Image (cartoon, rainbow, N blue to C red):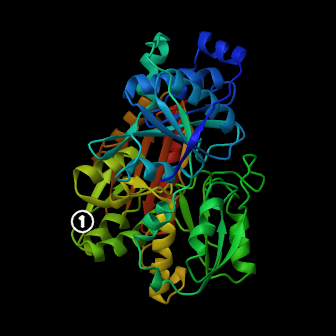
């Protein structure tokens, strides 16, 4: 890790004073359970970012903060303001520049890594959004700092004056990060492959070329230019139509398969040779089988809306299924408490024990390259056996009486096996469903799966009718 000579953070006097004296009303809904996110500049702006910088130092009591940022249009301005807050609170700032979020995790988690880190990003959210992902190292463990834990400090708007102002330095990109990513695989097993990779104008466009130069790949690069306007498609790969370009490229260019990343590159999705989008829980099983061969008997964490096939195959392969509520934080906690070697979600997040129990799209990229190379099969052939059930796309219901609806569903399906880990899950021999309230919106989210399509359609119609009838 190379640190460059000290540089000066420039915020003009008038602006700095305005930030220090600002006491405007803050929308506290931007402070989430895992991070901070809001629309720029109406919900999250320089004044608020400055206060968040000061509050982060007060809360964590750190003396140094490594700060990375993505390519969003508002990231430079928020970096300036947040850094000013950190400096004014007496902590030093190490500027990592434009990097993917997992690079920040690595720089905090490595043996001589930084005491804490903050990534300025809104991940897969629309371009108007931005935010902060925050971590701190405690007893060699990289812990995620929750956005909502800063609320009380922000509301008081009174920050203790430090003895000294912090200093700012820039840090050159570390090649150790690339070495760390490659430590998960045997790169000599990767065969010459032709693949399409859609970086979505996000941070994957900066890292994939560094990985590819060490591999026998022909890459068809899509949207590798960093652009916070996201001109090609939405930053969220799960948005309808977002994967059309990479799917079309795979088919037209006769590529072996394709990949798609989100904005800050911590989520990844696989596209088969026919342009089909592979669901996140199926990819989780590919990864789980690979890791359980290396680490027999280990735990694999998955959330409760993953396919019923997920725990079945994990058991078959000798692993321990670790079922969790929906959320990356819940998956991570289960891994750390129950000897989990990895965990994942339908959303495309995959966490690894050897990556500080944090997510990495690039580790998944390399592992899948090795798995597919070794199999000598097409991706569609690999996943066929891992998808024995029929699953519906998640359905969202905008309602104002969530509790009443949940009560009626619990009563209607009382003959099934019920649990309440996250909302209500009801399991029958040949189908199951989960319905859970959104933590941030007036929504109920329905996930369901069955042994065949006719049964799935029958039960989906039945549930939709009950929800809509009860909602009015």
| 451 is higher (above) or lower (below) than 323 | below
In the image, residue 163 lies at what x, y percent?
43, 16
| Left or right of residue 47, residue 352 in this image | left
| Left or right of residue 363, residue 197 in this image | right
Q: Residue 200 sits in which quadrant?
A: bottom right
Dot 1: what SS? loop
| Left or right of residue 159, residue 216 in this image | right
Image quadrant containing the C terminus: top right
In the image, residue 190 lies at what x, y percent?
50, 83
| 50 is higher (above) or lower (below) than 407 | above
Query: Who's the residue at 70% across and 84% down the image?
Result: 254
Query: Who's the residue at 55% across and 24% down the image?
Result: 85
Q: Could you say which is closer to the camera, residue 140 or residue 354?
A: 140
Instruction: Identify the residue under disc 1.
Output: 298
Q: Could you say which is closer to the camera, residue 455 or residue 90?
A: 90
In the image, residue 216 lies at what x, y percent?
58, 83
């Amino acid at each position: 890790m190379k640190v460059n000579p000290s540089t000066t953070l420039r915020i003009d006097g008038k602006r700095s004073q305005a930030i220090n004296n600002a006491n405007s009303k803050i929308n506290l809904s931007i402070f989430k359970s895992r991070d901070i996110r809001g629309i720029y500049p109406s919900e999250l702006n320089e004044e608020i970012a400055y206060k968040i910088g000061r509050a982060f130092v007060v809360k964590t009591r750190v003396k140094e903060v490594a700060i990375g940022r993505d390519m969003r249009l508002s990231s430079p301005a928020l970096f300036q303001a947040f850094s000013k807050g950190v400096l004014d609170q007496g902590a030093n700032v190490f500027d990592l520049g434009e990097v993917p979020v997992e690079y920040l995790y690595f720089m905090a988690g490595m043996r001589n890594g930084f005491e804490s880190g903050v990534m300025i990003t809104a991940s897969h959210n629309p371009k108007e959004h931005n935010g902060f992902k925050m971590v701190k190292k405690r007893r060699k463990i990289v812990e995620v700092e929750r956005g909502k834990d800063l609320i009380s400090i922000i509301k008081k708007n009174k920050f203790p004056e430090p003895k000294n102002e912090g200093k700012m330095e820039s840090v050159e990109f570390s090649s150790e990060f690339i070495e760390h990513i490659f430590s998960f695989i045997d790169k000599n097993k990767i065969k010459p492959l032709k693949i399409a990779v859609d970086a979505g104008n996000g941070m994957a466009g900066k890292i994939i070329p560094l990985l590819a130069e060490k591999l026998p790949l022909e890459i068809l690069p899509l949207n590798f230019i960093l652009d916070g306007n996201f001109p090609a498609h939405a930053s969220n790969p799960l948005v309808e139509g977002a994967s059309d370009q990479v799917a079309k490229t795979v088919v037209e260019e006769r590529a072996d398969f394709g990949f798609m990343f989100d904005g800050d590159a911590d989520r990844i999705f696989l596209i088969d040779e026919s342009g089909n989008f592979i669901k996140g829980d199926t990819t989780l099983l590919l990864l789980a089988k690979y890791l359980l061969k290396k680490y027999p008997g280990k735990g694999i964490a998955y959330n409760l809306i993953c396919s019923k096939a997920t725990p079945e195959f994990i058991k078959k392969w000798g692993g321990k299924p670790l079922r969790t509520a929906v959320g990356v934080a819940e998956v991570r906690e289960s891994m750390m408490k129950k000897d989990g070697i990895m965990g994942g979600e339908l959303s495309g997040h995959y966490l690894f024990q050897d990556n500080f129990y944090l997510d990495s799209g690039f580790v998944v990229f390399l592992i899948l390259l090795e798995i597919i190379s070794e199999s000598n099969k097409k991706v569609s052939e690999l996943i066929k056996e891992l998808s024995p059930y029929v699953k519906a796309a998640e359905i969202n219901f905008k309602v104002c009486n969530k509790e009443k609806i949940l009560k009626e569903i619990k009563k209607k399906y009382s003959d099934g096996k019920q649990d309440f880990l996250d909302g209500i899950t009801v399991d029958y021999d040949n189908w199951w469903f989960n319905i859970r309230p959104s933590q941030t919106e007036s929504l109920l989210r329905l996930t369901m799966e069955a042994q065949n399509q006719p049964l799935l359609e029958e039960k989906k119609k039945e549930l939709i009718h009950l929800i809509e009838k009860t909602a009015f």
